[in-house]
Each structure stands twice: as C-alpha cells, then as structure tokens.
Image (cartoon, rainbow, N blue to C red):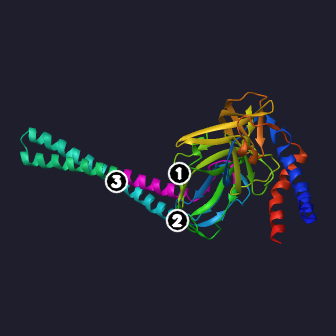
Amino acid sequence: MNKIPRKWLAAALVALAIIVPIALKRGGSGSGMPVDISPAALQEVRPSILASGLLAFEVEVNLTAEVLARVASIAVQEGDFVEKGQLLMRLDPETYNNVIAREEAGVRQNRISIERQRAVVALRRQQYERSQKLAASNLIDRNRLDEDRNQFVLAEADLKSSEEALARATATLGDAREQRGKTEIRAPIKGRIVSLPIKVGEVAIPSTASLAGAQLMKIADTSVIQAEVKVDEGDIAKITLGQTADVFAAAYPDTALKGKVSKIALAPTVDGQGRSYRVTLLLTPPAELQLRSGMSARAVIFLGTGGKQLAVPVEAVVTDSPEPGVVKRHVWIDDGGKARKTEVQTGLSDDRWEAVTAGLKEGDRVITGPSRALRRLKDGDAVRQSEDKDRQGEEADDEDPPSRGSGSRG
C-alpha cells in the first residue's frame, strides 16, 4: 500500500483548518440565519416634499408714476417707516400747472359766453312776445312773427351749447387738477420703505416695464413674512391648505422657520421643460431674526400630521410583482425562530418609517435586514437575532473571496 506524501497530508490539514470554521460559522448547528429583528411599533411617520423659492413680505406695494415728470423732492429714505397717506415724493408739477391755468381760462371764457347768451335769449324772448301782440292786432305779417320766434329758439339753443361747453371745460379742468395731484406720491399702506431706486432730478415714467424711472419705491408690511416656493407638478396634488412646513432661509441655514401652507396656485409656472406650482407658506419666525424679502429659502413641507401609527423600517418592506400591473408588499416575521412571509398593506412613508395599515399588529417581530438575508429568505427558514460577531463575520465573508482569489493568482 502506497503511503500518502507528507506534503499532500499537510495541504489537507490546512484546507480543513480553513473550511471547517467557515462551514460552522455559516451553517452553524441548526441555530438559524443571523438577521436583524425589530418589533412593529407606533412611530411618527412624517412624509415630506422638498421645495425651494424666495422669502417675501405678505403685503408689498410697488409704487410707479402715473404721470411723466421730473422728481422734484423725496421726503423719505430707504428703511423709513411710513403711515398710510404720508407724503413720500413730489414730482415737478409745472407742466400740469400750465394745463390747469389754460383750462381755468377756458372755464371763465365759457361762463362769460353763457352770460352773453342769456342776455341774447332775454332780448329774443321780448321781441317774440312783442311780435305776438302785434300779430294779434294785425300790425305785422305772419313772416315777421315766425322770424322772431326762430331767433328766440336759436338764442336758447346757443345758450344750451355754451352751458355744455362750460361743463366740458370744467371736466377738463378737473382732469388737469387730478393729474397735478398725481405728482404728489403718498403711501397707500402703513409699512416700511424697502426699496427706493429713483433719485431727485431723474424722470419718473408711467410704465410697468423694467425701465429706469418706472419704479419709484416699494413699501412693505414687514410684520408678516412668507415663503413662496415652487412645487413640482408631480407633487402638487399632495399639497393641501394648512399643512405644516419647515423653512430654512439662506441667512439662517440651520434654523427651521415654522410655516403653514396658506395659498396654492391654480396656474402653473413653466420653467424650461418643467412645470411647477407656486405654494405660499405663511411663516412665524422669531423676532430676533433679520429676514428680508428676496432671500433664497428651501422648504420641507410635511404631508402627514406627524401622529403615531403602526410602522416598520422602510428597508423591511419587500415589493413583489407576481404579474404585470400587480404590486404586492410583504415583510418577514420571526415566528418562534422561523421566518414567515406576511403580506401587508402600507400607507404613508418617510425616509425612515413606512406605515402599515393591514397585515401586522403591534409587537410582531419584523425582520429588517440585512438586505442580503431578506433576498435569500424562504418561508420556514430558521432565523435568529444577529449579534456583533455575526455582523463582523458577514463583513469578513464579503472580504474573504477577493483576498483568497488574489492569493491563488499570486
């Protein structure tokens, strides 16, 4: 009988020393697959939507010129608080003063013309009445009577025409005075001057376009501030009035400003190829924060109420598609050391938790990982709670194959 060479015997012993511990570690002696187990419990599930936009004061008024004139004086400075009706700026009224003087002269002229026409009417009335008496006595012919009557009627018509001309001239004078009144710019609301782009000597232009001189100043009620954010059209159906939000201004990136959804736009805003809807969030910031209109901001809008509900970690829920168009979800339960597949119905979810509306009860031992184990599990497999040494062993297993492979190639 041939003896086994010592080198082969040594190699076999080395192989056994490597293989046996690994086999014992992986298979164990029926102790089960090490898994992470977490009981189903009530959790705060707060799904959210991210959006970005700008801060703006709730009431902002852009003052523009209604007449073309040079800025004569400015009574306020940027940052000043003003009362409603307070004089803010004067435009040069000289042109409109000239128009008023011309129209006042026209009014006076029409009044003189009316006085003259009234005198003519009185004279024509007397002549007509005298002619009536003479015609009754056959002292004048019928033609003379008709002529005097026509002169009287024409005189009354001229008087009415002069009165209408006076009314027209008076209305024109009123328009001219109103135009001159628009050279005095007064505050439409109580607030603060947040922008004052025009200077004395520049020409104010009555235009809504972005032209130099078109905007005189901006007044805002700085006591109430809001965030105007854009929500993607795919998420806008989830937004409702009253939902809460955390808003982070660019100047205070670590401070969450509490807000609520107060307005939802009905018409979209088109940005390139995408569409979004403007959502307004009314904020209640701390008084010490110096927030300004136009600041960039990002918002986290919470879709749920944040109340506690039965939930499991999101990684524990496995999705299957047994046939096209059909989606089923299940979790694995530790049932006395055996893995049991349990179909569930899910609700809202956030980055950590997924609510379960049916299929589980509070306290059920849910297998949450590792993900590799969830993919390999079969109904009835033996499982046990993993320990630190199990996790270290799994990490070593992941690293062993490439190290052994590289050694064999060497």
Say which of marks 1 and 2 sits in front.
1
Residue 169, can we see it?
yes
Q: CA distance from mark 1 to mark 2?
A: 36 Å
| Element at label 3 | helix
The number of discs equals: 3
Front residue of this view, candidates 389 and 225: 389
Location of residue 346 in the rendering, given as x and y in whole percent from the top left corner: 66, 35
Amino acid found under the numbered disc labelled 1: Pro
- Residue position for label 2: 68
Q: Position of residue 57 (x, y in %)?
A: 68, 50
Please state the extent of the stretch shown in magenta in the rendering: 166-192
Q: Position of residue 60 (x, y in %)?
A: 64, 51
Spot occupied by residue 17 in the image (x, y as percentages of width and height) = 91, 55
- In primary-sequence order, the first of circles 2 and 3 is 2
Q: Which residue is mark 1?
A: 268
SS at badge 2: loop
Q: Is residue 195 above or below residue 282?
A: below
The answer to whether any part of residue 304 appears in the image is no
Residue toward you, 122 or 137? 122
Residue topped by disc 3: 165
- Nearer to us in this view, 153 or 217: 217
Estimate the spatial distance between the alpha carbons at disc 2 and disc 3, rounded to whole Å: 28 Å
Q: Are marks 1 and 2 in contact (CB under 8 Å)?
A: no
Say if the magenta span includes residue 19.
no
Identify which residue is drawn at 89% across, 62% down: 2
The answer for how far apart the CA atoms under marks 3 and 1 are is 53 Å
Quarter assignment of residue 43: top right
Q: Residue at x 83, y 54 (%)?
A: 397
Q: Earlier in the sequence, mark 3 or mark 1?
A: 3
Disc 3 packing (10 Å; few <14; some 14–19; many ≥20): some
Q: 155 or 213: nearer the eye? A: 213
